[in-house]
Image: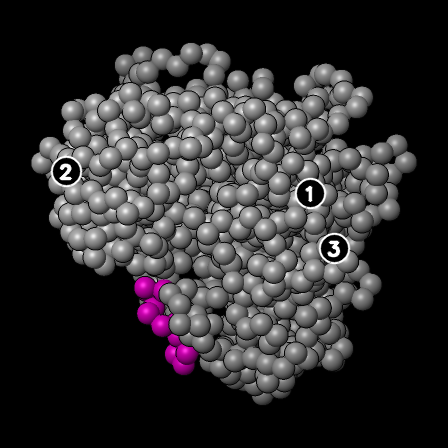
Amino acid sequence: MLSDETLLDGLQRAAFGYFLRTLNPRNGLIADTSRENSPCSIAVVGFALSAYPVAVQRGWMARADAVERSLATLRFFHDSDQSGSPEATGYKGFYYHFLDMHTGARVWRSELSMVDTALLIAGALTAGRYFTANTADEIELRELVDVLYRRVEWCWAQDGEATIRMGWKPECRFLNYGWDGYSEAIVLYVLAAGSPTHPIEGGSQCYEAWTATYQWENLYGYDFLYAGPLFVHQFSHAWIDFRGIQDRFMREKRCDYFENSRRATEVQREYARRNPRGFLGYDENCWGLTACDGPSHHLPELANERRRLFGYSARGVPYGPDDGTLAGWAALASLPFAPDIALCAVRNMLDRYPETLSGPQYTSSFNPTLASADRGTWVSTGHFGLDQGIVVMMIENHRTGLIWRLMRDCPYVGTGLRRAGFRGGWL
Amino acid sequence: MPQRNDPDSMAAHDVHERERLSNVHPSGWRNPPPADRYNLVVVGAGTAGLVAAHAAATLGAKVALIERNLLGGDCLNVGCVPSKAIIRTSRLYAEMRDAERYGAHIPADIRVEFPAVMQRMRGIRARISRADSVRQLIAAGVDVFFGQACFTGTDALTVDGAKMCFKKALIATGARPDTPPIPGLVEAGFLTNENVFDLTVLPRRLLVIGGGPLGCELAQAFCRFGAQTIIAQDWPLFLPREERDAAQILSDAFASDGIDVRLNTKAINVRVEGGQKLVDLVSDDYKSTVAVDAILTGTGRVPNVDGLNLEAAGVDYDNTLGIRVDDFLQTSNRRIYAAGDVCLEHKFTHTADASARIVVQNALFLGRKRLSALTIPWCTYTDPEIAHVGLYVRQAREQDIPVKTFTIPMHDVDRAIADNEEAGFVKIYVKERTDRILGATIVARHAGEMINEITLAMVSGIGLRTLARVIHAYPTQADAIKKAADAYNRTRLTPTIQSLLRRWFR
């Protein structure tokens, strides 16, 4: 049996390989998925910018190569069309969610995405904290990062409201997602609060308004800040080390977001053990309900399937959506919070469903309930950038804490956390 | 006023309707001569008016009750009663189609006989109308007047020309459906709660505009009767007041039923072409047009303040918010009170009832009962039902009350598993580090029945510690409440107590 270290190293390196294969070297954009004609997702670019330092540190990539790739990306965004027109790349320092891989223009009539821009900027700031040599390239890199961060007009995205609007389109202006409760957006609020140029109006009040819809729940015997899908408990943690630091809400609850994610991981495990919908495969070592690809009736092989299928969806516990689809990588991304149970689940799922790896990389999801004699367990085709990115970063945070360390030293993050009301611990 | 302009709308005048009308507005009725002066004149004979009139007359007051249309108001005639009757039938059809899940055969020929559904509803409505009948009121000593009330001064009004004076008056004229300002809607014709129960033919294709309680309940019911149903809600979730998980579960239930769910979607124009209604919908930047045979709107209610000449009575009001009352339900005229939908934010039958009882005490017995002291539950009768009482978490946090939720998914409740009714949850909100119940939301097949236990606990000041000592019959779905109380008790086992217990058992 592979040692934990060997297993993790193999999975982490394989996940990093995604960013090598799906890069457009001319503009540094990374594809959303490995599927044909996939556009770029700006969030995936944020993960790539964070993954290059990991690769350099681990000796998988030459520093100069990583700088060159990062620079290509940062130069592209710096020089991109910021007019906010339907074919532009961004507006007010934010970027459209999906971009053409070659031209960088908006595609799919996608929205100017505040949270995805935050993930992109978080990646840029990570690069800026890692590439600190006094070479011309690395100086330029840091300057570009600073410009990109400073030009984001976070306060504009409030549209006069207490909280940040989550999307905007040139055709209809701000979108009404009506988001309520805890989400992956802490990193957005921290970056928005920490800006020296365009911080959110109201600072801590804006953050508090966002947390006003939090629900502290006792579910399956665990007290935690509730959110159904696992990625909500993971994404902001890829960059920010929440161990020991508390905002007002967590002080009141005598908890912190890191411990909260550990409990959320335990809740996932409990849900899978109960398996209320009776799906095949689920147990205490086979879980991972999160935002991922999934089976849909649009697939020819599933056209006659009678069950409800949710395609790409933010699956969650305990209320679903749940169609029997699990993301193996989601357990891995909980490694820093709950290493024992996460590793146990990872090993168990890989052992029972080796097909969830395609090549050495995690596919987006698998569904044992939809197995058939000819194709076996249903497995999502290709690879998704977000999945690979979170795997690279969370394994690294578990192994060395590299990303957390870099971002702890980022003054914008420190300022943003303090303005949001965080105290204690490393702050 | 009610929109009774849909071509499919043709009320059936059968034996049940004749019985109901003879109860709630007998033909040939002649108003009695008014007394010189009444202790209480009640304007409007919906739930609030009937409750107040009966209660005041029972206590010996000289009471007049004035109604311009039907006794019983919306609840009996075009609201709770008829809707629950057809919802029950729609549940039965859903269960028939779902029979395999219960280990039963799906009937070979599930044929919906919509006229029979509506006939059953009319029978139930007629039966329940007996309790609200004019005869019952007369027997209770109430003088009943049919006609339009019009205030002529601060202590007098007329009904169809007949003048009556009062020591105290209660305005309980209710509310009516709001007409959404969608170009072409009125011309094309549309349904509201006021005429949808007159239908005798099931619309083949139905668009429901509005994702509030009425829209949600009827969209699901009509879908289950076989109408191709679209529901368009101008918000990212249904029932915006309820918590996200409740609304999410409802969206999933709708999708399972086959309803075409259009969230975050506005209807912006209606036109008629080739005998069908074409409705333009817009969701952010996505536009589409749907063709339907009927449109049902459930986008809010406006208070009935028209025609009363409230200015003469010195009663302040607002056309949207209704009659202005204080916490004692007194209007700007100290002789005149209001109750029910005409003045309340929570437009429910049971709040109309409770507010009417407050008025009787305050108006006739120098009482100082407060509206704000009421603990008001409510329920949306979809499948699963969504019931709530007390504060929401958001409201508690806005008031700086630290709140913790004890959540029991229905899939952890044995009876729900046995019943194949696992969708939903019981969430009880308590003040952090206490067992004081601030509120609760229940999503379950019979949430409306279950919420009453929480309401009782709240009104009685019973906390979760005591609820944990209440033996619940096993197996029942209400056992979820006991489980939540047990979960609370487990959190009292702090590490210190656990350590002491370990030492005890060493």
Dot 2: within a 10 Å radius of its alpha carbon, few (fewer than 14), some, or many (20 or more) residues? some
Magenta stretch: dominant secondary structure: loop
- Res. B460 mark: none
Query: What range of the chain is rendered magenta?
Result: A194-206
Secondary structure beneath label 3 = loop
Measuring 35% from the left and 43% from the top, which residue is drawn there? B147
The x and y percentages for residue B296 are 58, 48
User: Is B474 on the left-hand or right-hand side of B232?
Assistant: left
Q: Are marks 2 and 1 in contact (CB under 8 Å)?
A: no
- Up the image or down, A395 lies above or below B117; here it is below
Lateral position of residue B347 relative to residue B463, left or right: right
How many angstroms separate mark 2 from mark 3 (CA)?
56 Å
Residue at position x 65%, y 48% in the image = B7
Quadrant position of the C terminus of chain A in the picture = bottom left
Tell me which amino acid carries mark 1: Pro
Residue type at numbered disc 2? Arg
Whole-percent x, y for residue A150 in the image: 46, 80
First-in-chain label (3 vs 1): 1
Residue for point 32% across, 29% down: B455
Circle 1 SS class? loop
In reply to whether residue B219 is colored magenta, the answer given is no
- Distance between mark 2 and mark 1 Cα atoms: 51 Å
Q: Nearest the camera: B354 or B469?
A: B354
Above or below A190: residue A375: above
- Percent across and percent down for residue B371 are 22, 41
What mark, if any, has residue B203 been given in the picture? 1
Vertical relation: B63 (above or below) A224: above
Mark 2 = which residue? B37
Which residue is found at the position 28% from the left and 50% from the top?
B150
| Residue A210 image-quadrant placement | bottom left
Between B194 and B80, the one lying in front of the other is B194
Picture quadrant of residue B489: top left
